[in-house]
Amino acid sequence: MDRYKSGAEELLERIEGNDIIIGILGLGYVGLPLAVTFARAGVQVIGFEKNAEKAQMVNRGQNYIADVDDSELSECVEIGRLGATTDFSRLAEVDAAIVCVPSPLDKFRKPDISFIEAAGRDIARYIRRGPGVFISLESTTYPTTTEETMLPILEEQGLVLDRDFWLCFSPERVDPGNKSWKTKNTPKVVGALGAEAQRIAMAIYGRAVENLHAVSSPRVAEMVKILENTYRLVNISLVNELALLAGKMGIDFWEVIEAAKTKPYGFQPFYPGPGVGGHCIPLDPFYLEHIARNYDFDLTMIETAGRINTIMPHRMVVKIIFSLNKQEKSIKGSRILFLGVAYKADIGDERESPALEIINEVYRKGGLVDYHDPYLPTIATAEGIELESVELNEEVLAGYDCVVITTNHRSFDGRWIAEHAKLVVDLRNVVPAGINDHVYRL
Ligand SMILES: NC(=O)c1ccc[n+]([C@@H]2O[C@H](COP(=O)([O-])OP(=O)(O)OC[C@H]3O[C@@H](n4cnc5c(N)ncnc54)[C@H](O)[C@@H]3O)[C@@H](O)[C@H]2O)c1
């Protein structure tokens, strides 16, 4: 048996015998659930985190991610199955390193893969020289990143593919707030570089994730993730544009969707809203757009969908102005309460949330803004407006000139809100149909 094969076989045997340590770089919305999932499957996990406060919290068994169960995390820490560190030299202890660091857009809306590169450099610098280590990238990025960015970073340090390391891309599909689909039971796409790497990848992920789907290369896996999120961006932008037209034509677009849903095939419902938010859907398609330019290729569909999405918050402000106007009020000087700032229901994540942009614009136009969000006690907009969530009761609702429903948190009772507010702008279909006199819908 040659050296490369024996290395892979040795690692596979150790995986089989559950005698491995997995290092997870980045303990955020993706990395922490993954770390707990592996630890609960009996695997030894070390979390590598740049943010010392997060690492300390994990080591105290304190949870800070809503999708992770408090007791599951503390239990894993207590039995010594999971620990976190800011000391990246401890990467020398791991048999596998999984990268879950951020992949944002920069201020020019271009991909910022600097976190991925930094993680790659740390791995290259510290992993053991000797028996090979499995490396997997989970951060969302444009196709070719694993092979054209990660691989050279590792090779620059003298590491040899298929001898010192095996490389893979496996996109995370975390859906924050989803009670049914978690890291463990959501099918996971795995695309490694070469047959040995794929066997190792399947064996490692197979320890913790129930259902794996192998694809032929990292770039296919990278494209899968972008397809999934682009599909959502394009469809949400489509229904948003149609909802705006339907509103002008006096057609209840929500009723249209309910009716279209009765078609048993060929139609999947998407729902209008004030724009898409979160870490993925508003950003990921632009990763693809960026790499497409290298191939002299215009992704006009993504560009158009992005434009519709970008303008949605402004259009919602116009709707608020229009609704106040009907009550002979101007936006300037009106007291406006926003219900929900999180980008989607029942979570406390306001990243890229359209609500923040709407609040900003209303404030700039002279509106006196407040908000209530049961999941976000304080917020700060990009323009530096800092607010604390106000209490929500009948008197509070009645005290505002306009109440705007920006997130459909389950705790928001549309009928009760409409009963007590003077004017409601419902951007999420929370108020039941039929209550119309002082309610304006998207
Ligand atoms: N949040 C989601 O719903 C979701 C879903 C699927 C995929 N993703 C993708 O997963 C990746 C991570 O997203 P997230 O939401 O978990 O981000 P996050 O910001 O919640 O967590 C990332 C963590 O990585 C840490 N970090 C930054 N640089 C580091 C480094 N060099 N080494 C170690 N730790 C580092 C940060 O301190 C942070 O705690 C992104 O690429 C994102 O697009 C996110």
Image (cartoon, rainbow, N blue to C red):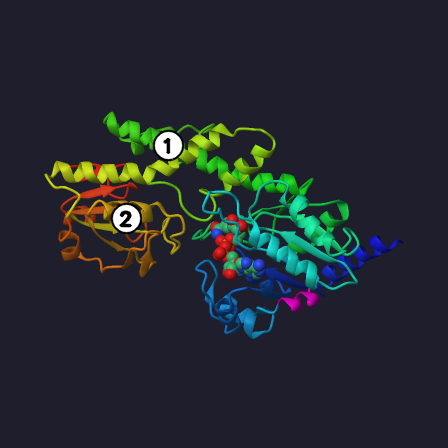
In the picture as drawn, the residue positioned furthest to the left comes out as 328
Q: Which mark is residue 239?
A: 1
Give the amino acid type for the residue marked by disc 1 in the picture. Val
Is 224 above or below relative to 9?
A: above
Is 238 above or below relative to 410?
A: above
| Distance of label 2 from label 1 (alpha carbons) | 23 Å
Question: In the rendered structure, which segment of residues is drawn in magenta?
Answer: 88-94
Give the amino acid type for the residue marked by disc 2 in the picture. Ile
Where is residue 324? Give x, y as percent. 16, 40
Q: Main secondary structure of the magenta part?
A: helix
Lower sequence index among marks 2 and 1: 1
Q: Which residue is mark 2?
A: 359
Q: Secondary structure at mark 2?
A: helix
Where is residue 23? Give x, y as percent. 63, 62
Is 156 above or below relative to 326?
A: below
In the picture as drawn, the residue positioned furthest to the front comes out as 108
Please state, as top left, top right, bottom left or bottom right, where the N terminus lies in the image.
Answer: bottom right
Where is residue 421? Give x, y as percent. 16, 48
Where is residue 356? Give x, y as percent. 32, 49
Displayed quadrant of residue 184: bottom right
Relative to 315, is 86 on the left or the right? right
Residue in view at x 53 percent, y 35 percent:
289
Residue in view at x 58 percent, y 37 percent:
291
Q: Secondary structure at mark 1?
A: helix
Please state, as top left, top right, bottom left or bottom right, where the C terminus lies in the image.
Answer: top left
In-front residue for pair 110/211? 110
Q: Is mark 1 within 8 Å of ligand 1?
A: no
Local packing at callout 1 (Cα closer than 10 Å; few below 14, some 14-19, many 20+) is many
